[in-house]
Image: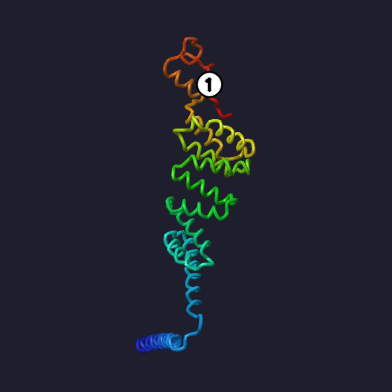
Amino acid sequence: MKLKKLFSAKNAFFAASLLAASILINTFSSCATTEVSVPVPGQGVVKTRNIYVEYYMLGDAYFKLEDYKKASENYELAMRKKDQYWAAYYKLAKCYVFMSDWSNALPMYKKILERDPENASLKASLAYIYSMQGDFKQSISIYEELLEAQPKNQEYLENYLAVMAADEKKFEKNYVGKFTEAYDILKTEYPENTNLQTFETKYKELMKIKDEETEGEELTEEGEKEDNPDSPVSPEKKSDKKTID
């Protein structure tokens, strides 16, 4: 008896569901028929516009989910709507950055910057893209331009130092003075900056500067005495290369 009631209840549920689905299908069918037989002037244009707005919104949704591939696909479609072209174009460029697609991101950011040449945020983004492509010269040039306008900007100083340090082959020849100057500004203005020690260590590594304590340990291991005047490197001898205090 209980099974019979349950079966009847299920049948009633499925019947109701089918009825609802049928009503929806008939409704959409009648609407479709109406649109074909009695078209509303301009309705097609409105629908097209709404579709591209939805593409843009879908792009934003996927972007928040960090699915940049899906987001980029929707932004590309959204660009077909004229009045949201540049907004979608910018979002698409950001997707390329997050996907590390530098070859596509670079020309897009350059084009956006042409429309807004004084935008410091765009310049910083472009400098970052150049650095990720290994074009340190262009990146450093942009950071120098940014620091000329904002010489105490902590983020610019950090990135400037990082890019110079990344160009290891040309560091000693081209960037030593600039590096120490930027480092001094960062240390003076932001003494609690957590990256100061990292930059100092990297500088010593690039300049092949060893700490005096380390040098003393190496000499001891070789059997040299600290007070031996004939020692090839006495403890009193200091490196002729500039150090970062």
- Identify which residue, 99 or 79, lies in the foreground: 79
Eyeballing the image, is 7 above or below 134? below
Location of the N terminus by quadrant is bottom left
- 113 lies above or below 220: below
For residue 16, say whether it is visible.
no
| x 50%, y 37%: residue | 164
Residue 39 in view in this figure: yes
- Amino acid under label 1? Asp
Question: What residue is rendered at 48% in x and 70% in y?
Answer: 52
Tally of numbered discs? 1
Q: Nearer the viewer, residue 202 or 35?
A: 35
Q: How is the image coloured?
A: rainbow
x then y, percent, for residue 61: 49, 65
Q: What residue is pinned by disc 1?
A: 240
The quadrant where residue 222 appears = top left
Disc 1 secondary structure class: loop
Could you say where residue 122 lies in the image, as x and y percent from the top left? 55, 51
Residue 66: where, in percent of width, then height?
Answer: 46, 59
Q: Split into 4 quadrants, where in the image is the C terminus?
A: top right
Residue at the spot x=49%, y=34% of the render? 202
Q: Position of residue 135 (x, y in %)?
A: 46, 42
Using the image, determine if residue 118 lies above or below residue 175: below
- Residue 156 falls left or right of residue 71: right
Residue located 62% across and 36% down the image = 185
Residue count near mark 1 (Cα–Cα under 10 Å), binned few <14, some 14–19, many ≥20: few
Give the vertical position of 209 relative to 189 (above or below).
above
